Amino acid sequence: MKFDPTKDYYAILGISHNANESQIHQAYKTLVSKYHPDKHQGNDLEELAKEKLVAINEAYSVLSKPELKTEYDAARTQPHRQQVGSSSAATGNGGTPNPPPPNAATAIRKFVFLIAFLAALPFILRFVRSPRAAAVIGFAVLLAWFGPRILKKIKK
């Protein structure tokens, strides 16, 4: 197949699942102008813009062709259907695609880190006599904890 049915191309372009060709094209043009490399050259978002542009082009290449769009929609509604061109040996479990790895381990690790830091905080603050230093430490922890979440929201 020429597309990945696990990706939501409609969400990438920011359109509804029943969007017509002109809406797809308009969303594509808007996003390409927003994430064009020339607009972000030399700035911090240059890599992000390149990645977004690749995803936008991939989504548009599938949704702009009616036959591919129909095939993609069918694959999205029937995820248990074996993909064209894939073999049972590649999937490892009789032709059904392997599920993505669970993200629970990462969440547990982050939670354990937060609990450990909060438990150690009174001992750390004993050695920090200045309220300003305590505030800086607290802000650094909050930034380490919430920073990746905020960046994900900004990137979307």
Image (cartoon, helix red, strand yellow):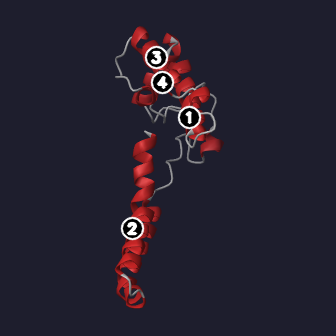
Q: Nearer the viewer, residue 116 or 32?
A: 32
| Front tag of 4 and 3 | 4
Q: Which quadrant of the rendered structure holds the N terminus?
A: top right
Give the alpha-carbon distance from disc 1 to disc 2, as whole Å.
29 Å
Tell me which label, 4 or 1, sits earlier in the chain. Answer: 4
Give the alpha-carbon distance from disc 4 to disc 3, as whole Å.
23 Å
The secondary structure type at the circle numbered 2 is helix
Give the alpha-carbon distance from disc 3 to disc 2, as whole Å.
50 Å
Give the residue drawn at x 37%, y 23%.
15
**Residue 37, image x, y percentages:** 61, 29
**Residue 42, image x, y percentages:** 63, 38
Give the residue drawn at x 60%, y 48%.
92
Give the residue drawn at x 40%, y 51%.
150
The secondary structure type at the circle numbered 1 is helix
Q: Which residue is mark 1?
A: 49
Question: Is disc 1 in contact with disc 2, using a CB cutoff of under 8 Å?
Answer: no
Q: Identify whether 31 is placed above or below 125.
A: above
Q: Amino acid at mark 4?
A: Leu
Circle 3 packing at 10 Å, graded few (<14), some (14-19), many (20+), is: few
Q: Is residue 153 left or right of residue 99?
A: left
**Residue 20, image x, y percentages:** 38, 11
Q: Amino acid at mark 1?
A: Ala
